Amino acid sequence: MSDQVKFVLDETHIPKTWYNLTADLPKPPPPVLHPGTKQPVGPADLEPLFPMELIMQEVTGERYIDIPQPIRDVYRMWRPSPLIRARRLEQKLGTPAKIYFKYEGVSPAGSHKPNTAVAQAWYNQQAGIKRLSTETGAGQWGSSLAFAGSLFGIDVTVFQVRVSYDQKPYRRALMETYGARCIASPSNETDSGRAILKQHPDSPGSLGIAISEAVEVAAKDPAVKYSLGSVLNHVLLHQTIVGQETIEQFAMAGDDPDIIIACAGGGSNFAGLAFPFLGLQLRGGRKRRIIAVEPAACPSLTRGKYAYDFGDTAHLTPLVKMHTLGSTFIPPGFHAGGLRYHGMSPLVSHAKELGLIEARAYHQTTCFEAGVEFARCEGIVPAPEANHAVRCAIDEALRCKKEGKAETIVFNLSGHGHFDMQAYINYFEGKLVDQNYDEKELAMALAGLPSVAA
Ligand SMILES: *Cc1c(COP(=O)(O)O)cnc(C)c1O
């Protein structure tokens, strides 16, 4: 093995297709249901929200979907992203394990999210749409869609979760720099927002509430479509370029990962890295350990219930079967990461139920500790969400040390933390609190799950 640390492909290696895991699953995921009839929804039910091409990607059973050339042309700005071996971190830990990370922070918005934002903006432009409405938690999705909208002449309206709107003015400035309009959620601009404000005037907001507002705007105006940055099948599909590139880069490196790790909020960067590897396995390849890492304060995969639930708080979306903490669950306000969604991608949830992946939850301070250790070895300051993946990778490397095993680990460094330095300041000042989610509130939120016949 050479001592090469960086595995870089030129732009001719940008994947030409996205990979759809459903084509290889032993059992299809449960259907999406209409909230009124509780019958499976058809493409027409989703038309007020999404352009038909994206709806077809949501439901397709095809294994490979061609990536249109105009989208690949934009990907050329930063793709293929590098695969990097964290040799200094390995040495610092004194582990026989090899640690690699796929670095998605090289995109203009600083995370993996533009991979799907660009695709969604292009398909909407092709359908003649002039405005997109969306929500954002930490601000990364909003800035990614704002960036993509600016490339394709689409106006973008972003409902930003109140607590992050107040805590992250630089993210808002970035969205506005790309030309988006940013509104703190809950807002007075929608029925859903007004209803929440009436009950809780000081509501910190949540992704579930912001989704309701963004969906409502699109549902009421035929000229506006809605765009989601995670959770849905087509979003995960767009992210699979990450794993496909990684497979090729491991071939370059003459190595092969035993353990694949990514943080999971809605599940898109996790699926993006893991699903192409999982596809190899399902088509007869070797089995690898695949670990999704989530915050202990919002533990949908590890503690949530696998059940049909709404994607939003005001119950405007269809019902999807997923690991959920309940659509009215509001995670603790003072959490650094963007991993605060009450649910999990249905496809990731299904893979978990099939026993194809593992899940693990960590408190945030131990994740920041890992992120700081990583930064001091590798130079890159990870986004708070990505720190969950770093923590898990370090723990696995330390386990290898204890067991004397030279396993190969890869994790998705889903973004950099340059816009999240306030969270690092809070960490250094000892102000980050490790909150467990409130058992009583969770029980209440779960009691409110919609009833669906088995
Ligand atoms: C949004 C985001 C996440 C969480 O979203 P997923 O859909 O679970 O990937 C993780 N890391 C970064 C850097 C993000 O911006």
Image: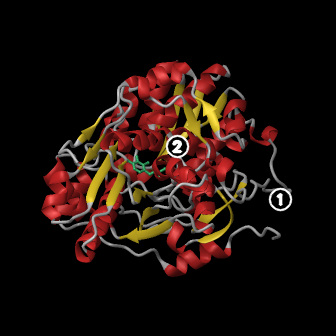
Name the residue: 46% across, 20% down.
73
Side of 378 relative to 286 (left or right): left
Amino acid bearing label 1:
Lys
Give whichever of 292, 408 is nearer the camera.
Answer: 408
Amino acid bearing label 2:
Gly
Label located before the other in sequence (1 or 2): 1
Side of 237 relative to 171 (left or right): right
User: Disc 2 beta carbon < 8 A from ligand 1?
Assistant: yes
- The percent coordinates of residue 414 (x first, y second) are 37, 47
- The percent coordinates of residue 441 (x first, y second) are 54, 76
Label at residue 229: 2
Side of 435 relative to 142 (left or right): left
Name the residue: 54% across, 54% down.
285
Side of 183 relative to 34 (left or right): left
Label at residue 38: 1
Residue 447 falls in image quadrant: bottom right
Above or below for 405 versus 253: below
